[in-house]
Image (spheres, helix red, strand yellow):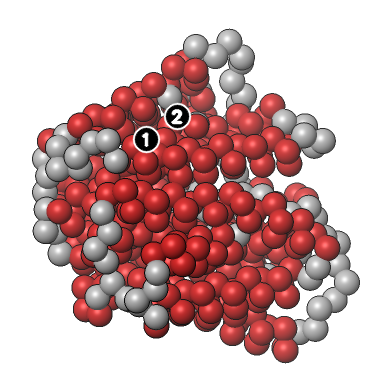
Amino acid sequence: MGVLMLGAGLQSTLLGVRATLEGFPTTVTGVIMSCYYIGYLLGTMTAPRLVRTVGHIRAFAALAAVASGAILAQGIFVQPLTWGLMRLLSGLCFAGIYVVAESWLNDRASRATRGRLFAVYMVVLYIGLGTGQFLLIPWDPRTSSPFMIVSVLISMAMVPIVLSAQQAPEVAMPRKVRLRDLYQDSPLGVAGVTISGLISSIIFSMGPVYARLSGLGMTKVAAFMSLSILAGVVMQYPIGRLSDRLDRRTLIAVVCMVATGVAGGIAIFRALPHALFLVLTATFSGFALTLYSLSVSHVNDKLEPSEMVAASSALLRINGTAAAFGPTLIGALMSFFGPRAYFASLASLTGALTLFDLWRSMRKRTTPEHKNAFVNTRPRA
């Protein structure tokens, strides 16, 4: 998964940068990036059945092979329609790959080790995504070389899985859960998962586009994206540990207020020193990328153990659905208002969640409840 995330991190930034170099309209670029999340949603519905039919190893190998071919097709056919279709296919494949990896980890983990195992897993994913940004520097994004590098990395990620001597687990299809009941149990948690999907898709998909439109070179684009991603690694544990000691609703409000203030400041004060700009960017991402974990943990506090699997599947779909709209929305806004719409929109999203949190707190006082351990995870989409 670490090798795979190197390719995934390079792929997302590469497509955003190449699209700007090819002169694709910002709105069109946003639609292309949104296709990944549409494919991801399809993957969450089809991947469990595929894994159940052919097994973990074959499913992983097949999906990785298709994802490897999809990025090569994007390097050959540089046109919006082809890119959109291949981006959708990539999303479908990566959804299946996440199902394989995480269900395998769940099967191997015990109750005593699951939290630590998944914490390491998430750190590996974030480090892979963040490090992958710098792979864009040695190769010219106008050439086909970086597309080939992504394909090589995705293909190499198959080797440890295919050669694994361990027996793969069986996967049971999750039962359905009604979204209405989930919202009634935890309105703030569902809202947080939704806003998190929008924010994460905007950062990962349109961050490189914003950086290029702001006049940053390849090295600075890589630094901008790497800091945005790796900040999420740094902040997960401190925020998570704090959420186990404090009321999660209060902490979500604090995180949102900090993120809103930082993003709003970047949008208003455009002529910031570059070093300060990077620090503020890392601060925003570090706080904003914890919202998914905080929201999922808040939902789990309200559920019985027997409900958690079905609820997790529903939350994943909510997050992915919201993520599908993020790049298209921000692409249209940036096309109309310019690059400043990037951080202005992010500030609006975290600000809206702050207001919703405060409104919910005024309507319903915090009551003593059983608090489960913080779920250290990231938006799967």
Q: Is residue 266 left or right of residue 308?
A: left
Q: Is residue 208 left or right of residue 368?
A: left
**How many numbered markers are drawn?**
2
| Residue 255 visible | yes
When asked about the image quadrant of residue 302, the answer is: bottom right
Question: x%, y% of residue 14?
Answer: 27, 45
Mark 1 → mark 2, Cα distance in angstroms: 7 Å
Helix, strand or loop at label 2? It is helix
Q: Residue at x 64, y 53 (%)?
A: 236
* Residue carrying label 1: 7
Q: Amino acid at mark 2?
A: Val
When asked about the image quadrant of residue 295, the answer is: bottom right
Helix, strand or loop at label 1? It is helix
Question: x%, y% of residue 185?
Answer: 70, 69
Q: Residue at x 44, y 49 (%)?
A: 226
Q: Around disc 2, counting alpha carbons within 10 Å, would you say few (fewer than 14), some (14 to 19), or many (20 or more)?
A: some
Determine whether 29 is above or below 2 in the image.
below
Q: Is residue 156 left or right of residue 163?
A: left
Q: Residue at x 56, y 77 (%)?
A: 353
* Residue carrying label 2: 3
Determine whether 322 is above or below 222 in the image.
below
Most foreground residue, 34 or 255: 255
Q: Amino acid at mark 1?
A: Gly
Asked if the residues shown at circle 1 and circle 2 are in contact, with their CB atoms under 8 angstroms apart, the answer is: yes
Most foreground residue, 32 or 269: 269
Q: Residue at x 35, y 71 (%)?
A: 342
When asked about the image quadrant of residue 300, the answer is: bottom right
Question: x%, y% of residue 337?
Answer: 25, 80
